[in-house]
Amino acid sequence: MSLATAIAPHEAARPMSREEKKVILASSLGTVFEWYDFYLAGSLAANISANFFSGVNPTAGFIFVLLGFAAGFAVRPFGALFFGRLGDLIGRKYTFLVTMTVMGLSTFVVGLLPGYNTIGIAAPIAFIAARLLQGLALGGEYGGAATYVAEHSPQNRRGFYTSWIQTTATVGLFVSLLVILALRLNMSAEAFADWGWRVPFLVSILLLLVSIWIRLQLSESPAFVKMKEEGTVSKAPLTEAFGRWDNIKIALIALLGGTAGQAVVWYTGQFYALFFLTQTLKIDGTTANLLIAFSLLLGTPFFIFFGWLSDKIGRKPIILAGCLIAALTYFPIFSSIARVGNPQLMNAHDKVKVTLIADPAGCGNVFDPINIRTFTAPCDVARRALAVAAIKYEVANGAAGSEAKVMIGSKEIPVDKDFAKNVTAAAAEAGYPKAADPTILKQPTIGGVLSDGRSLQMIGLLFFLVILVTMVYGPIAALLVELFPTRIRYTGMSLPYHIGNGWFGGFLPPTAFAIVAATGDIFAGLWYPIVIALMTFVIGLIFLPETRKRDIYAAD
């Protein structure tokens, strides 16, 4: 494909060329990796803990796994700075070839690492190191892929072309779901715990080899080639991107008026929804994964649709509309999900009065973003235990210095070492469902899900959440690319994207749980994504420019 063809600003609609398809495929495979690995690390946390952290008690081991998981989020912005700078200095192609390789090998290595029983403390250290490398590489992968595709796209089709990258994020999640489900359904629980959990990490090497082979055949981005020929390549991308107020302002607007809201809508519709199904509603993991998988399968084409639509009406109205609709509908949607998934739990919330009585001075905050705090104050222990059990409660002020206690109806449960077990038993006696309660949605086979009316209702509700995800995520790559000039584009767009998705989005589940634990309301955690989405809507409405007609081939 010639440079002139690649950068024609008002090219008439035409079928995608073979070279353009190859560019999109090669670039998109990185986001497949990103979300494939992300979901594996989260859903297989218990297996990882048992293998790499068996030298410590199970609770501490699980905490260390989550710490490694969170560390991958925390380092993403640093990877964005490091690899973004390289991408603006030496080119898009070679930089995201490196990020793909590092990211893929880091995922693959987890499946090979010996366990704690074999190499001792080196096992958890090696695991966390792999997670850190994976997070760093991810920081540079997305910006390179989005930039590379956009700079190969006709100006009036950038939303459509880059939306394929957004689609493959869900593909990665969907593939990981299928791999885990296939293994769980076709081997014993013992075999899966012993060695089967490693298989999803090991098969990633096939995706890596195909991705590298395709990327090696690609040429450099035409916009970068043009800039290099004209001698306008930035000599100090970091200084230029974040040392000048005009560029810092763009990054802040991109973050607060774009990616922050996009991130919380994305994480709420995918990951918090899964957390809500399994941890709050106590739906078994297989059924919950199947429900999410079906909703993703139905919703995935809408990434392309909204990317295409953004070429017609603009990026800004679609993204901001998705944020606003999410903020207005989350409470009724999640309430409906709860009543369909576990009606007995919701009936108990309506009928069973639970009160935590404690001295206010003995109640602290229960925010634990990376799950490493140890709570000893009885009030805090009680609140977290009640939240884990999905028990709705109110807080009443006790006398100064009094012991914390929980009242379920007229029954008093002291906050002692057996509190979690005793309060769960008392709640069950009062009307809360037990784990085996038949009213909890349980359809563990694919045929069962498709033939069950309640499951179909659940898929419909989850599908609505996925549609909101596609609205905010489908056009975001094109928007970010168009916001920044060519000479600092890789650096400039990567940082707000990864702060938004790595921090605002990545820490959504623990933040939401802390709000639930503090309030006693299983829906209160939704305030976090609602407030962030509304913030993005307001800031974006006022400050975010419409970018779809911008010439992205100018160096400045």
Image: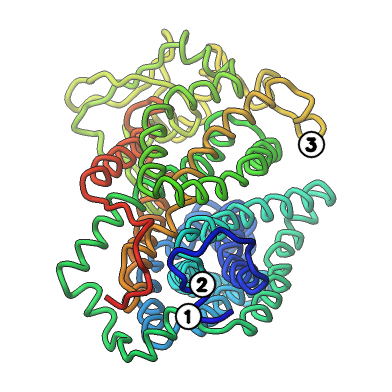
**Residue at (35, 47) in percent of width and height:** 316
**Disc 2, disc 1: CB below 8 Å?**
yes
Q: Which of 287 and 321 is in front in this view?
A: 321
**Residue at (47, 46) in percent of width and height:** 266
Query: At label 1, which amino acid type do we have?
Result: Pro
Residue 33 to residue 275: above or below = below
Quarter of the rendering occupied by the N terminus? bottom right
Which label sits on residue 120? none
The residue to which callout 1 is attached is 222
Query: At label 3, which amino acid type do we have?
Result: Ile
**Disc 3, disc 2: CB below 8 Å?**
no
331 relative position to 496: left or right = right
Q: How crowded is mark 3: few (under 14 residues within 10 Å), some or many (20 or more)?
A: few
**Which of marks 2 and 3 precedes in the sequence?**
2
Residue 32: quarter of image? bottom right
- Mark in front: 3 vs 2: 2
Give the SS element for disc 2.
loop
The residue to which callout 2 is attached is 152
| Residue 113, position as x, y percentages in the image | 65, 74
| Residue 83, position as x, y percentages in the image | 41, 78
**Residue at (30, 56) in percent of width and height:** 255
211 relative position to 189: left or right = left
Q: Does any portion of residue 94 appear in the rendered image?
A: yes
Give the spatial CA distance, label 2 vs label 1.
7 Å
Which label sits on residue 446? 3
| Residue 397, position as x, y percentages in the image | 22, 20
**Residue at (43, 59) in percent of width and height:** 478
Query: At label 2, which amino acid type do we have?
Result: His
**Which of marks 3 and 1 precedes in the sequence?**
1
Give the spatial CA distance, label 3 vs label 2.
41 Å
Give the SS element for disc 3.
helix
